[in-house]
Image: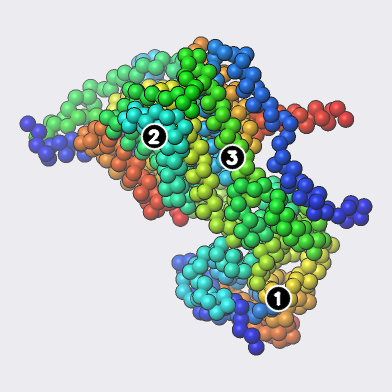
Amino acid sequence: MAASEPAVGTDAAAGFLLQRHRWHPAEALPWLIAIAAFFVFPGHLALGTQVLIWILFALSLDLVLGYAGIVTLGHAAFFGTGAYAAGLLSAKLGWGEPLTGLAFAGVCAAVVGLVSGWILLRYRGLTLLMLTLATTIMLYELGNARADITGGFDGLTGIAITPLLGAFQYDLYGRTNYLYALAVLFTLFLAARRIVYSPFGQAIIGIRENVRRMSAIGSPVHRRLVTIYTVSAAIAGIAGGLYAQSNSFVTLGALSFERSATVLIILILGGTGRLYGAFIGAVVFLLLEDHLAKLSPAFWEFGVGLVLVLTVLFARRGLLGLFEDSGRSIARLWR
Amino acid sequence: METTLNIAVGILLDGLAYGMILFIISVGLSVTMGLMGFVNLAHGAFAMAGGYVTVSVMSGFGVPFLAALPIAFVVVGAASVVFERLLYAPLYRAGELDQVLLTIGLVFMAIAAFTFFYGPAPKPIRVPDALSGSVDLGFRTLAAYRLFMVAVGAVMVTVLWFGFERTSLGAKIRAAVDNRRMAQSVGIDVDRLFTLTFAIGSGLAALGGGLAINIMGLTPTFAIQYLVFFLIVVAVGGPGSIKGTVVAALVLGITDNAGKYLYPDGGAFFIYAATIAILIAKPAGLYGRE
Amino acid sequence: MSAPILETRELHKSFGALQVAREINFSLEAGARHALIGPNGAGKTSFVNLLTGVLRPSSGRVLLDGKDITRVPQAERARRGVARTYQINELFRGLTVLENVCLAVGERTGACNNLWRPAGAGRGRAVIDEALGLLEALRIREDALKRVSELPYGRQRLVEIAIALGQRPRVLLLDEPAAGVPSAESHIILDVIESLPRNIAVLIIEHDMDVVFRFAQHITVLAAGAILTQGSPQEIAADEQVREVYLGKDTHG
């Protein structure tokens, strides 16, 4: 036992746990970049808005997959529910106020998350995978069956959004949409960040690391999982609502397995369990898709598959993990 | 004028044929899942490859349909070993997320590759004259191919059942499914067993894929289009159980067919609802190991 | 004679033809230092699983403080004061030692119900203070900020116990606490066990007879799922049946 090591005082330990949630200067970077993009790429704000929406969606998945360790192939169920909730609110019920529309989308998705989570999260492994997949597809088929309401494959049209806060008009260049999406993303990111660094967040990580022991120390595991699942569903639903409002259009694709798979790929590509993986993954994936998918859809799909295989085998912690590793190597070389 | 009985018989036969294909394709997935717990979402891609091999061999070398099928079995079965050794084996100890991601990646690559080489249009197939057209059974004429499928399926069920229950290979597989560690401790080389099982399972998937062309069509999206059904058959039947796969495949085939006929707009909904209900009641599947 | 804090009555568990627990009538006194011994396969760990709620008995009852907890699930039993350690470590390997223990303390105090305040802020400091106190008592305080996976196995074993103590249990079930620990370090584990607070009832499963005789005031011998005999260390040491069960009938003393 090293006698020279000083005893770790309360302040040092608390300091460690407190400092962890304090904002690191580098964390300002994504937001600065997002704001800069607004000025530097004024012609690409429509794409930018979709990137922000995907970031929000991937963020919601990170809470469930990266932090809680719940493997789900059905997260599009919440995105799609939110999208249709916001879309139908405007198209069928004539309510076009955007912020309440988002809130409504979030609540609807949260209800779906609460109910499905309460039932499904008692299971693990292949069973849970199949249940989440079947739930999403079931909702998809429901949407298809009631195409009279949802617009089916042709899509839901007639979504008209009133000016944001009564003052900001929607413009052809998508400026308002972009800033609106950015503001929503920032707000929900703050919330997600708080949750992740809270004692509850620690318990969720504990459940991911060793669910057996968590149960043995008295943690109400099921209740905790349903909570994070519901929160995640709400965020995904709000992302869906943004999607409906910014595109003024919703198709069944919002509820599809393809959407679940895409957000999963985006998050894995970026890196799970660190929140910022969602940012990197969405930006890289969508920018590449925008450029490459047009050239050759087959090559793009092949590339996505190949990158996924390589990521799983060699870069399991994603791009964020690669950055962290190279940062550490550079720091070591520097010494 | 079709009577209700006639319609019912038609639905039943179509459903049985469809179910038999689902069985032949899914049985390999079930056994490998039960044996190694490996979630292989690329299984549908092996079936699809079997379809394309069948078509290529027939059009490229003039091989008749019934000879092309075993060729597809062998070619895809052999190729699958390469995938298993190089890509799957490193992930046996990894969680199911990694396995899901790897195999989804492989599916995407497969779809893209087959689109590139074969184009996105459905591939036509010329089944032998004996198998096309209808067979007159007196009270009703039935599609010959459907009857053929049911017959092939019945034979396959019997062969696989026999192989599983009566051969020493089958016994080893059952032992390893039941308790892998114990099987290893009595000297069964589980890794080699798995490779062999995987190859046979993928070969069977390819065989099923070839048989499916005439009923389900063949496009490069086949791998993902029917993937959910293969997974449902395995999960609901119970991974590692041949009996479970048979039951689940036939029920799913008949139900889906009936649904398409009777409730074209939303029949599929009930399949997923039923899947959820069954898995909630029996998480390990109808005949799965608890 | 105080009422037992943990009891089983005719506790029975079978898996098909395999009977892992046969009509076990067991009681653990408050503040006890009780050892459970028996040959391999006797059903000792299964018994602990029955006590903690991991296994549901086929018949019979488990009582805590006289109240029937047979139907109570594991997490609830833990909240009522039943803690256990595992024969093979069940730790949160990717987290620091401090976080490991804070989880136990935080779950117990309800701190983990808080989604909003950062861990460690405000009332969270009390959780950290208590966790550090536990690490101090087990003499692993200097490892507080190290990741568990980086520690040698012997110290990990101490973290295993620290987590259980973080639950402030009234009953502590230790499943072979010195298992896997290099013999040079096992005395540390034993010191820790000896200095456990007197108000905790401790049941220790052990193979090492030196540990058992040093620590236990009362010993229960389990064989083939049933209690063979119980008694004080002296009685058990002198018991012929016990020797037979451990060494086989044909050995000489």
Secondary structure at badge 1 equals loop
Q: Which residue lies furthest to the right in this view?
A: A4
In depth, the one of B177 and C29 nearer the eye is: C29
Give how far across and how far down residue B289 sits, in percent.
45, 53
Q: Mark 3 points at which residue?
A: A191
The label number, if any, that marks residue C225 in the structure image = none
Q: Name the residue under label 2.
A: A85
Q: Which of marks 3 and 1 is in front?
A: 3
Where is B49 relative to C130, above or below? Answer: above
Q: Name the residue under label 1.
A: C199
Instruction: Read off the chain for label 2.
Output: A
Give how far across and how far down residue B265 sits, in percent.
25, 32
- Around disc 3, counting alpha carbons within 10 Å, would you say few (fewer than 14), some (14 to 19), or many (20 or more)? some
Please tell me in which quadrant of the rendered image residue C162 appears.
Answer: bottom right
- In the rendered structure, the answer to whether residue A200 lies left or right of residue C150 reads left
Q: What residue type is labelled 1?
A: Asn
Q: Does the image show residue A38?
A: yes
- Around disc 1, counting alpha carbons within 10 Å, would you say few (fewer than 14), some (14 to 19), or many (20 or more)? few
In depth, the one of C11 and B170 nearer the eye is: C11
| Mark 2 and mark 1 on one chain | no
- In the rendered structure, the answer to whether residue B107 lies left or right of residue C163 reads left
Q: How far apart are marks 2 and 3 (CA)?
A: 22 Å
Q: How many marks?
A: 3
Q: Distance between the residues labelled 3 and 1?
A: 43 Å
- Around disc 2, counting alpha carbons within 10 Å, would you say few (fewer than 14), some (14 to 19), or many (20 or more)? many
Give how far across and how far down residue C82 sits, in percent.
61, 68
